[in-house]
């Protein structure tokens, strides 16, 4: 019955519908907010022990726990709360199935994870490599972290993630495959990508490319008929500060549904479509950054605007990843320096 209902939902929500939804919720300024963000009253305050919080949720008839990693002046968090959690059916579905615990990624308050290990809230966020706020960790009834969302997604994609976990699809398939039943890959082949001068032309032998000039590599996985991709190119990728950073690295653009031949940074021959599948990509655009040895440094697989992208590019080009494996740790150092 669940599969039938899901299939009906996919038929109703056509690709054009998704594009219209994106338009409503992707165009915003990602500068830090002037005032601290106000959280919904139904957010739960942790007891200091996530295991106890989970037990309380289960006793209340919930299916599990969601831990929300945020920060006070995060514009992406504001969009998530306003557009996703502000949607009444999403709010109701979330509250029905989960208790949602708010954690501040910069806080030194003590917190115990469901496995009994002790952290500060900041260290717990580092443990889960949140990197971008808002980030969400879904815990199942046994206290196991089973799914993560890192960054802001439009409401339809967050709604899909909720159902993916709540209805147990995560036990049978990856979120990419679950979501792909709604986002038909062949549709996106009908439209071209945004052509830019800074993207390197094929053939895409990425291993040879980074071996040649020893510069970091950005691979931009995109698709046709993608409003989020259009916004990326019309806004942040048109800004002088961003373009100046991109000049310091190799940049390649791939259609994530195409059969374009690619040799990956680690020397594996494949296609753009198969590589995207192997990487588990479910959002367009997704930007993945590799170091000069071909190892992945970081990826942005959620909505990205100017300040977030500039921060990541600076982190890469200043070699921050060489001293701080986690982008959040590097950001903390920058905050203290400035």
Image (tube, helix red, strand yellow):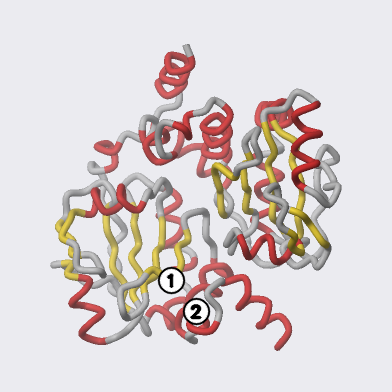
Give the x, y percent position of residue 181.
Answer: 36, 30
The spot of residue 330 in percent (x, y) is 60, 78
At horizontal 52% and vertical 39% (from top left) the residue drawn is: 157
Relative side of 274 to 90, left or right = left
- Left of 78 or right of it: where is 135? left
C-alpha gap between disc 1 and disc 2: 7 Å
- Where is mark 1, residue-wise? 297
Residue 306 location, quadrant: bottom right
Q: Is residue 25 shown left or right of residue 213?
A: right
Q: For this view, does 327 lie left or right of residue 118?
A: left
| Total numbered labels | 2
Residue shown at the point (86%, 47%) measured from the top left: 47
Check whether the beta carbons of the residues at disc 1 and disc 2 lie within 8 A of each other.
yes
| Placement of 273 over or under 88, stated as above or below | below
Q: As drawn, which residue projects farthest toward the front?
A: 116
Indicate which disc residue 321 carries: 2
| Label 2 SS | helix
Considering only order in the chain, which callout, 2 or 1, is on the residue closer to the N terminus?
Answer: 1
Q: Which residue is drawn at the image coordinates 62% and 47% (left, top)?
A: 137
Which residue reaches farthest top?
1
Question: What residue is drawn where x is 49% and y is 67%?
Answer: 236
Quadrant of image for the C terminus: bottom right
Up the image or down, 227 lies above or below 31; here it is above
What SS does tag 1 mark? strand
């Amino acid at each position: 019955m669940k599969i039938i209902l899901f299939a009906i939902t996919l038929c109703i929500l056509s690709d054009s519908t998704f594009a219209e939804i994106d338009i409503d919720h992707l165009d915003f300024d990602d500068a830090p907010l002037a005032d601290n963000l106000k959280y919904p009253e139904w957010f739960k305050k942790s007891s200091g022990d996530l295991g106890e919080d989970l037990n309380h949720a289960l006793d209340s008839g919930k299916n599990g726990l969601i831990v929300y990693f945020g920060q006070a002046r995060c514009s992406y968090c504001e969009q998530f709360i306003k557009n996703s959690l502000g949607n009444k059916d999403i709010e109701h579905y979330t509250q029905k199935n989960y208790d949602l615990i708010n954690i501040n990624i910069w806080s030194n308050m003590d917190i115990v994870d469901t496995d009994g290990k002790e952290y500060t809230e900041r260290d717990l966020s580092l443990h889960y490599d949140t990197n971008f706020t808002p980030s969400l960790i879904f815990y199942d009834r046994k206290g196991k972290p089973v799914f993560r969302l890192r960054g802001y997604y439009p409401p339809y994609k967050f709604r899909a993630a909720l159902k993916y976990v709540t209805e147990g699809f995560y036990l049978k398939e990856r979120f990419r495959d679950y979501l792909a039943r709604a986002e038909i890959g062949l549709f996106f082949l009908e439209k071209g990508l945004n052509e830019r001068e800074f993207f390197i032309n094929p053939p895409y032998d990425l291993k040879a490319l980074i071996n040649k000039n020893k510069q970091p590599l950005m691979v931009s996985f995109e698709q046709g008929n993608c409003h989020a991709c259009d916004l990326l190119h019309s806004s942040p990728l048109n800004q002088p500060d961003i373009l100046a950073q991109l000049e310091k690295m190799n940049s390649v653009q791939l259609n994530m549904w195409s059969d374009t031949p690619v040799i990956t940074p680690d020397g594996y021959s494949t296609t753009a479509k198969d590589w995207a599948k192997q990487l588990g990509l479910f959002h367009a655009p997704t930007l993945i950054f590799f170091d000069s040895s071909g190892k992945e440094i970081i990826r942005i697989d959620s909505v990205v605007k100017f300040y977030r992208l500039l921060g990541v590019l600076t982190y890469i080009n200043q070699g921050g990843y060489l001293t701080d494996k986690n982008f959040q740790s590097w950001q903390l150092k920058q905050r203290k320096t400035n």
